[in-house]
Amino acid sequence: MSAKSVVTDWLPNRIKTRLWPVGRAAIATAALTLASGCATQLSGPSASLPGDETLAADAPSSLAELLPQRPLNTIDTHSGMHSRSSEAVLQAVAQLGTPYRWGGESAQQGFDCSGLTQHVYRKADLHLPRSSSQQYQATDRIERDELRPGDLVFFRLKGSRIDHVGIYAGDDRFIHAPSKGKTVSFASLKNRYWARRYAGAGRTAEANKLQLASNRSEEN
């Protein structure tokens, strides 16, 4: 078995498929990049709600369209340790491209917004209740300028109730399961649609606890 195939074994097929046009070497590079935590600017398939201006899902012509411009420092450590919240971000990256499904809680079923955040937190040994409003109540409020990768970002899409949640990935970007017919993807807090509906951010008490970086599986 080649070194490249070993490197790419854990990389989700959803991401491999988007890299086929630029070759196996590109896939290996992407796998090594993600494994080291360089995940903040990886562009998933277009999965926007109305008014969300995200990147198109066309196959990339170069790695520059998929790979980050710089490492995510809170994840890219040299000790083999990172925080539980950082692990949750990597777990969310592994779900990019998973279809939205109302009530979904797994990669096999698909995810709704709070099902995704609960799932990736659970994989990082962090507990969250099921709904977005419950998750809002269960986390400590933090200011926008205090956001760190792995924090939760909450939105009011319809009225005054918290009804949408994503996981912050750095650089004003978050990963979420948007809506029916869409897939797990990145979105920007700077986008006007999300900026107008932003309701606050939350952090769990154990988010900063350190753990060994784990082997991530597409199936879990």
Image: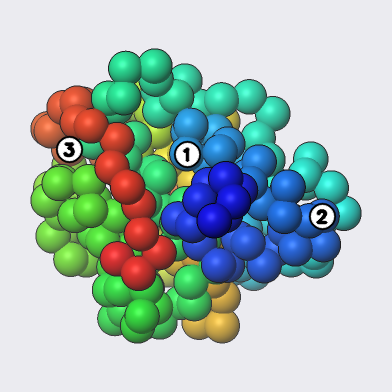
Q: Which residue is mark 1?
A: 35
Picture disc at residue 22? 2
Determine the CA span between mark 1 and mark 3. Answer: 24 Å
- Residue drawn at 56 percent across, 83 percent down: 181
In the displayed structure, does residue 92 sit left or right of residue 214? right
Residue on which disc 3 sits: 204
Quadrant containing the C terminus in the rendered view: bottom left
Q: Which is closer to the viewer, label 1 or label 3?
A: 1
Helix, strand or loop at mark 1? helix
Mark 1 surroundings: few (<14), some (14-19) or many (≥20) residues within 10 A = many
SS type, badge 2: helix
Q: Earlier in the sequence, mark 2 or mark 3?
A: 2
Compare marks 1 and 3 and give the one earlier in the sequence. Answer: 1
- Does residue 35 appear anywhere in the picture? yes
| Mark 2 or mark 3, whichever is nearer to me | 2
Q: Residue at x 67, y 51 (%)?
A: 27
In the image, residue 72 above or below residue 26 = above
Mark 2 vs mark 3, CA separation in Å = 39 Å
Q: Is residue 64 left or right of residue 174?
A: right
Residue 62 percent coordinates (x, y): 84, 47
Q: Is residue 46 above or below residue 87?
A: below
Q: Tell me how the rendering is colored.
A: rainbow
Q: Above or below — where is 5 with respect to 51?
A: above
Q: Are marks 1 and 3 in contact (CB under 8 Å)?
A: no
Residue 193 image offset from top left, x and y in percent = 61, 55
Q: Give the secondary structure at mark 3.
A: loop
